[in-house]
Amino acid sequence: MNQKNKLAFLFLFIASLTFAQLHTYEYKRSIEQPTDSWHKINLKPEMYKHLNQRLSDMRIYGVSKTDTTQVPFLMHSSASKKVNRDLAFELINQTKNEDGIFFTFKLEDAQLINKIHLDFIETNFDWKIQLDASNDQKEWYTLLDDYRITSIKNKQVTYQYSQLHFESSEYQYYRVLVKNIDKAELDRARLRRFEVEKGENISYPSTITKKETTNSNESLVFAEMDNTARISRVLINIKSNFDYYRPFKLEYLADSVKLDDGYRYQYATLVTGVLDSSSDNTYTFPATTCKKMRLNIYNGNNEPLHVDSFNVSGFRDYLLARFTKEADFFLVYGKENDQLPSYDIEKFKDNIPEELTSLSLGEEILIIPNQPMVEEKGLFENKLWLWILMILAIVIMGGFTLKMLRSES
C-alpha cells in the first residue's frame, strides 16, 4: 500500500469513526445554516429531560457528502456575571515631596471606577496609601486614607496585595499618594470598574401535590413543575402569621426504581438552610435538572408551618459555536455517561465577538442507527430535473402533434 492509499484509508477510517460516534446519541435537531463564523444557539427547555445533569452529552456535527466533523462550542448561561472592565487612562504626573510620592492618572472622561491595581518594581514593601479624586485638579476629594499595600518575596514566601478597592466614584483624575517613602517605581497600573451584569431568569410554574407530617414532627411538602426544567433558584412562600426559624432541606427526585411492592424513590439535595420569618426565604443553588421536589422542614416542638407555594426559576442555557466549513449541521444529544468535550476555543474566549446572531433549532428527531443524518432529496425535489422532464415532455408532445398533422394531410 503506497503513501497516498494509506492517507486515504486513514481519512476514511476517521470519518467512519466520527459518523459512528454521532449515532451513539439518542436525539438530533437540525441547525439553521450559519451566516458567519460565530453564532449563538439557544437550548430549548424541552431538551433538558434528555440531557444528563452536567449537560455534557451534546455535540454539534457538520455533515457533508465527503466528511463528518465536530463543531467546537462553549456552554454559557444567562446567569449574572461578575466583570472587571479595564478603563483607558494615562499617567500624567509623578512627583515627590515631604509627604511621599504622587502618581496622577487621567481618564478619557469622568467614568465610574472602584478599583485601581498597582504593580511596583519593588518586591518587598509595606506602604500606606492615600487616594484622592478630582474633576479639575484643583479641588480634591479623599476616597482612601492609610490604605495598606504589601509585597513580600523571598525563598519561603511570595505574596503581594496592591489593589485599591473603594466605593464606586465618577471623576476624571485620580491621585495616589504613597506616604512617607523616598522611592517607588511604578511598573504598571490598571484602573477598573467591577460590576455585576444582571442575568435573565426564567420562571417555571409548579404545584404543591402533597403535604405530610411525620411522627418526629417533620413536615414534608411535595411539589412538581409542569415540565422538566433546569432550575437554580427557589422562593418558598410561607403563610404562617407567627415568627419562625426552622432548618430545612430541599431535594429533587433524582431516580426511581420499580420493586414488587411499588416504586422506591431516590432524592438528592438541592439546598439546605433555615426558613426565617424575617427574610423572604429565597435560596440559590447550582443549576439542576429536575421536575419533582420535596421540602423537609424540621419543626422541633413547634407548630408546623403553612407552605403556600414555590416560585421556581433558572437561567437560559446557550451555546457559542464556531463554524468553519459548509455542511448540514446538527445538534445531537442524549448519552447519559458522556464526558464534556474539550476544544481549543476554551483558551481563546477573548476572541469571541460580543454580538452574535442566533441560529434556530429544528424539531427533535430520534436517531435511528445506520440511518443517514441528511435525507437525500428525491428526483422530483430537484428543480433542475423537473425542468429537464418538462422540456422533454414538451418535445415529445410536439413531435406527436407534428406527426398527426402530417398523417391527416
Image (cartoon, grey):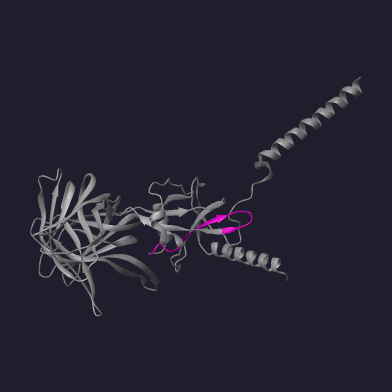
Q: Residue furthest bottom?
A: 156
Give the number of marks.
0
- Work out which quarter of the rendered image holds the N terminus and state it: bottom right
Residue 374 appears in view:
yes
Q: Based on the displayed image, in which of its 4 quarters is residue 306 positioned?
A: bottom left
Q: Residue at x 15, y 44 (%)?
A: 135
Locate residue 65, reporting x and y percent. Answer: 63, 54
Locate residue 29, reporting x and y percent. Answer: 50, 53
Residue 345 is inside the magenta segment = no
- In this rendered view, identify the residue nearer to me: 278 or 354: 354
Locate residue 39, reporting x and y percent. Answer: 45, 49
Q: Is residue 33 above or below residue 62?
A: above
Q: Is residue 184 above or below residue 35?
A: below
- In this rendered view, identify the residue nearer to me: 95 or 346: 95
Q: Which residues are magenta?
A: 54-68
- Work out which quarter of the rendered image holds the C terminus and state it: top right
Q: Residue at x 50, y 47 (%)?
A: 34
- In this rendered view, identify the residue nearer to me: 314 or 269: 314
Q: Residue furthest top?
A: 409
Q: Based on the displayed image, in which of its 4 quarters is residue 244 positioned?
A: bottom left
Q: Is residue 301 above or below residue 205?
A: below
Q: Residue at x 33, y 65 (%)?
A: 253
Locate residue 35, reporting x and y percent. Answer: 50, 45
Would you say 187 lies left or right of 48 here? left
- In this rendered view, identify the residue nearer to me: 16 or 322: 322
Q: Residue at x 43, y 46 (%)?
A: 358
